[in-house]
Image: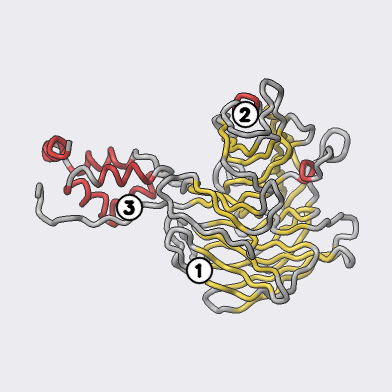
Amino acid sequence: MGELAEDLFLRLSPELVEEVFFRLPPDEPACLVHASAVCKPWRRILADLGFRRRYYKFHGTPPVLGLFQQGDWLFREGARFVRTSALFPAQRDRPCWFAMDCRHGRALLASLGTTCHLMVLDSVTGHQRLVVSPCNRPVSFSAAVLCAAQGCDHHGCQGGHFRLAVVTTYQQHRVTSGWLYSSETRLWSELTSVHHPNVRCPYNLGAPSVLVGDALYFNVGGIVECQLGALRLSMLEKPVDGNGRLSMSHNPIDGIGTLMVKEDGRLGFAAVVDVTNLTLWLCETGPVGAIGWAKLRVIDLNLRRCSQHVNSALALGGRSVHALAITGVAEGTQIIFVRAHVGSYMVDLKSGRVRPVDAYGRKFFPYASFCIPAMEAGCTGQGQ
């Protein structure tokens, strides 16, 4: 096979071979490894840094390579990583840490003791950095990580400077406060606080965030907008159904829903409001900011077929499998994660594809990054 492939390579231009390699799926790094093992000329192409940059640009959005899971169906605490790609480096469980966020090739974990520590982790290289939080753990605590480089395409920026945002809510005082950290200055900047006397803020640890332009949005009671440039917080109301409220079922997570970013870059919201269907909204904005929510569509998740492929003692046979809650969103994509009676599922809202995920976490933080395994060129002579 190696001799035949090398003979084929000599008959084709390197540019044409690159075009073939560009189409190898980024969510399966094993394909690149197998291609590099065929012959030395192929390995030289795949080991080239220029090829890797062009490969990232060709695919654009980094693939989801795994899930940081906060707790599981047995309500065990701590952060656990579930790989969705076979060759992605294994991650050890961290029972004393909580998953808080994943973005721009970084994961953010928190250790909530007398002093709150935050860990910024590059899961591809294993590099980690600890930062002391500016506040002790309140009733509601959320944090986010993002790349600090201006104009970065976030295809391979894990090693650069980053920013952290922390948002806390004290139910008794009905006040939400925030801080912003820069790894370049190693300093925290305090954001203006916002009062919200009419918003119910239950216990919430690690509410997922989404990044839209220069603003982070957290789903904590209401929707907290963190304007990074202005260092200012503000509140948005959640979308409502026809009855004037989000429908609440026996599981309180259902009515909370989750924030997401639509394909056009605008803020969206999704919730399982009647146990069987997923409802999507889009935030409408005006000259002075958000003015309301428009309902986009209702999706029947139809998880029954997928449940037949899940090896679980809780399988429900031919009966309907209802989604209980949205447990995560892959930012920059139209992929969400939902929990049902028989397990968890990854749902592609664009294609309608639904597939089971081997995890039972209460919250998922999808880790998205390009991962091309390290390769040596092997030789320098053409055709050697």
Instruction: Classify residue 257 by image quadrant.
Output: top right
Tell me if I can see residue 292 in this picture.
no
Q: Is residue 57 above or below residue 112?
A: above
Instruction: Classify residue 298 by image quadrant.
Output: top right
Instruction: Give 281 or 331, whichever is nearer the viewer.
Output: 331
Q: Is residue 171 above or below residue 4?
A: below
Q: Position of residue 167 (x, y in %)?
A: 72, 65
Residue holding disc 3: 52
Q: How is the image coloured?
A: secondary structure
Q: Residues within 10 Å of mark 2 (few under 14, many from 20)?
A: many
Tell me the residue at 69%/30% (across/down): 297
Q: Which mark is residue 128?
A: 1
| Helix, strand or loop status at disc 1 | strand
Instruction: Give 92 or 202, whichever is nearer the viewer.
Output: 92
Tell me the distance, in whole angstroms, between the alpha carbons under discs 3 and 2.
38 Å
Sequence-earlier tag: 2 or 1: 1
Residue holding disc 2: 307
Tell me the distance, in whole angstroms, between the alpha carbons under discs 2 and 1.
37 Å
Tell me the residue at 72%/40% (across/down): 325
Of badges 1 and 3, nearer the viewer stands 1
Sequence-earlier tag: 3 or 2: 3
